[in-house]
Amino acid sequence: MKLSAIGIRRLLQISSSLVIVGLLLEIVSLLWFHPLSFVLFAFVAATLIGLGILVYLVSLVFVVSPPAEKRG
Amino acid sequence: MIAILICQIVLSIGLASIFLIRPSVTTGVAWKIVAFIGLCVLPALCIVGGMNTHVQRSEQTRFCISCHVMIPYGQSLYVDDPAHIPAQHFQNHRVPADMACYSCHADYTIYGPLNDKLQGLKRIYMQYVTTPPDPAAIRISGGFKNAQCLHCHLGARDFEENAIHAAIMDSLTSNQMSCLTSGCHDTAHDVANLSHEKFWKPVQ
């Protein structure tokens, strides 16, 4: 399955958004000295960052490659 | 340490922002590498760094007593009575003062730290979802294991040269007889009677 360039850009934007939100929440969890800060980090921030990484890797796997006949 | 991690997070956010605003830049090879670093390598390192920081933080005394039900246990470390084992250890720095709870309550086994963290999550669940227990009614599941005392005391001269300890050493190491047995070191966190106690006030 191949995705169009626009689709990949969309995936990159989704990935970036997830990573940014996850990292911002990680900063909050690091500055907040409370038992719930670990829960915020482990169950929300790390999950969002992990999803962002996963979406980015998916965009790599399904990247558009030139047709076989045009190669070499 | 946290400052370095936050700098790393800010750098990751900066890189990720580029790909959020202009995803088309990834058409070039150099930007593809930057994208891999900014959206995969650095965020993964941030997760590892964050986990490490949170795990280290959870070993601190002030973290343990930041839970409402643990406040009396924190106060019990200042009881002015050497018969109170936790207070005596804490006040004389027989355990690191900033890691007092963890030093005696850590499970010193291969998966011990993981079990400790899972127990911690269970307590957070009890605190915020179900009914938090009465501090005086809290008991360690499975009882306090001698291994947690022997982790430091076994091999120490004053412990092994003590005639009573020497006589019951096998029972202590096999956990058949608890260190907290009545008549031995039986006063731990007596939180039910804290109102009757005198407290030590540190100079600093």
Image (cartoon, helix red, strand yellow):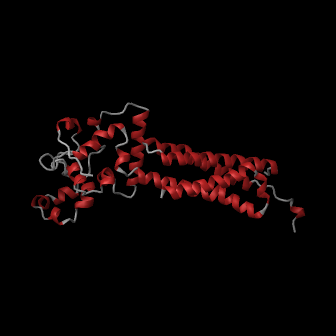
**In this view, which residue lies farthest toward the top?**
B131
Residue toward you, B2 or B160: B2
Residue drawn 58% across and 46% down? A24
In the rendered image of this protein, does residue B150 appear above or below residue A55?
below
Counting labels gives 0
Tell which residue pokes out farthest to the front in this image. B204
As drawn, is B50 to the left or to the right of B28?
left
Q: Is residue B197 visible?
A: yes
Name the residue: 42% across, 51% down. B57
| Quarter containing the C terminus of chain A | bottom right
Query: Residue placed farthest to the left in the image?
Result: B163
Give the percent coordinates (x, y) of residue B67. 37, 40
For this rendering, which residue is in front, B6 or A62?
A: B6
B105 up-or-down from B153: above or below: above
**Residue A61 point in image, percent of width and height:** 73, 55
Name which quarter of the figure residue B169 lies in: bottom left
x and y, in percent, of residue A49 in the image: 60, 49
Q: Position of residue B56 (x, y in %)?
A: 42, 54
Residue placed at 68% from the left, 59% from the top?
A: B36
Left or right: B173 as drawn, with respect to A31 = left
- Which quadrant of the structure image shows residue B73? top left
Can residue B139 be seen in this snapshot? no
Question: In the displayed structure, does residue B10 sit left or right of residue B101?
Answer: right
Asked which quadrant contains residue B75, the reply is: top left
Residue B130 located left or right of residue B199: right
In the image, what residue occupies the spot 81% across and 55% down? A64
